[in-house]
Image (cartoon, rainbow, N blue to C red):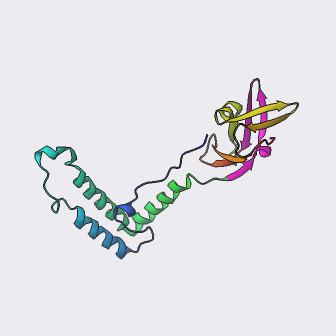
Amino acid sequence: MQLANNTISQTHYSVLNVKEDASHEEIRTGYKSALLISHPDKLQKPTPTADSNHNEPQSRFLEIQTAWEILGDVKSRALYDMELRVSRQEDVIADEVELDDMIVEANGDVVELFYQCRCGDYFSLDSLELREMGFQLLLEGDKFLLQTHNSVDMTSIVLPCGSCSLKIRLIINKDTQP
């Protein structure tokens, strides 16, 4: 359930080698500089044997053109910035919860843990998934005990909601009881 970090590796800002809070003039200067460095007329003509990388300079030139078209216009830049912020917020954790905040249901051999999302659905995790992560969920009377086989005192698991895009971080202390 631990989710990978989904960040955008190359933005239009990085294509033009400017900061995200750059002024229009700084963006224009970055565009001109990148254009001069990678313009197809400025680069050496590829030899017939170097055909495998023939489109690389042209694609770099098109990336620079696209970045300038978007960042050079105030309205399209504002829209792009908003989309960039939204894409980065996908990794934002809505809440941190502990095991005692979870609802526990036993269904035969599988024990399920739930936490209600504000959209009405649930964040969920079961004993099989916990076992794959190195935890064991034990039943002691009417109480459940979560044990870990390693020496880590505390860890966390990021859980996505079953319906919406929200995520929570489940904090697990060693030998805690839900």
Give the main secondary structure, helix, strand or loop, of the magenta stretch. strand
Q: Residue at x 37, y 66 (%)?
A: 71
Tell me where residue 97 appears, x and y as whole percent.
73, 49
In the visual, does 100 lie left or right of 141? left
Which residue is the extreme one toward the right?
141
Which residue is the extreme one toward the left?
48
Residue 55 included in the magenta stretch of the image: no
Q: Nearer the viewer, residue 137 or 74?
A: 137
Q: Nearer the viewer, residue 14 or 148?
A: 148
Q: Residue at x 25, y 65 (%)?
A: 35
Tell me where residue 156 appears, x and y as whole percent.
67, 47
Which quadrant holds the N terminus?
top right
Query: Can you say whether 48 is above or below 17 in the image?
Result: above
- Give, as a single range, the part of the protein colored magenta: 95-116
Query: Can you say whether 93 is above or below 51 in the image?
Result: below
Q: Residue at x 75, y 24 (%)?
A: 109
